[in-house]
Amino acid sequence: MIRLISNIYSRLFSSKEQSEPDLEVVANIAITPLGQGESMSNSVRTCRKILNKFHLDPHDHALGTNVHGPMSKIETAIRECHQALHKQGVQRIQTEITLNSRKDKKQNIDTMMAA
């Protein structure tokens, strides 16, 4: 089952297999380190630095972070967040990702919030 999900994500996030350019998406990401106590400030700070490194302009909110950019760049940033948190000693991480893409018009976080 895990391999099936991994294959689906690989195909979803891989723009190399597609003849079209990488999709621009708005994503909501909630990365939750499990078993680390109540405070998540260190984990949030770590992942925010990574999202900034990829120029994804993160917008934090109560239940996660919104970002905008190429789907492959977002996937790579999420992978780096997981790797960084594991290096910090986090044993288990749960991540929820919601993606929104449009082909009929340009979108970003600000235009979605204004709609």
Image (cartoon, grey):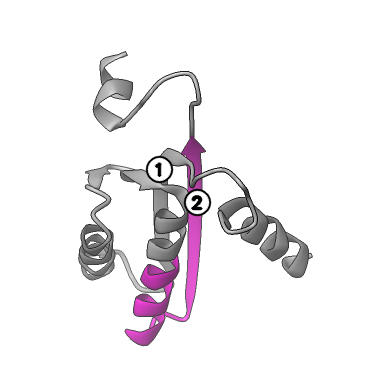
Q: Is residue 75 left or right of residue 6?
A: left
Q: Is mark 1 on a helix, strand or loop?
A: strand
The amino acid at mark 2 is Glu
The amino acid at mark 1 is Asn
Range of magenta residues: 79-100
Which quadrant of the figure contains the C terminus?
A: top left
Q: In this view, does 14 lie above or below 66?
A: below
**Residue at coordinates 79% horizontally, 65% vertically from top-left?**
1
**Residue at coordinates 41% horizontally, 42% vertically from top-left?**
27
**Residue at coordinates 43% horizontally, 64% vertically from top-left?**
76
Q: In which quarter of the image is residue 41?
A: bottom left
Q: Mark 1 points at which residue?
A: 28
Q: Is residue 34 above or below residue 86?
A: above
Q: Is residue 35 above or below residue 7?
A: below
Location of residue 96 in the rendering, given as x and y in whole percent from the top left corner: 50, 51
- Identify the mark at residue 96; answer none if there is no mark: 2
Q: Is mark 2 on a helix, strand or loop?
A: strand
CB within 8 Å, label 1 to label 2: yes
Distance between the Cα atoms at labels 1 and 2? 8 Å
Q: Does the magenta stretch include residue 84?
A: yes
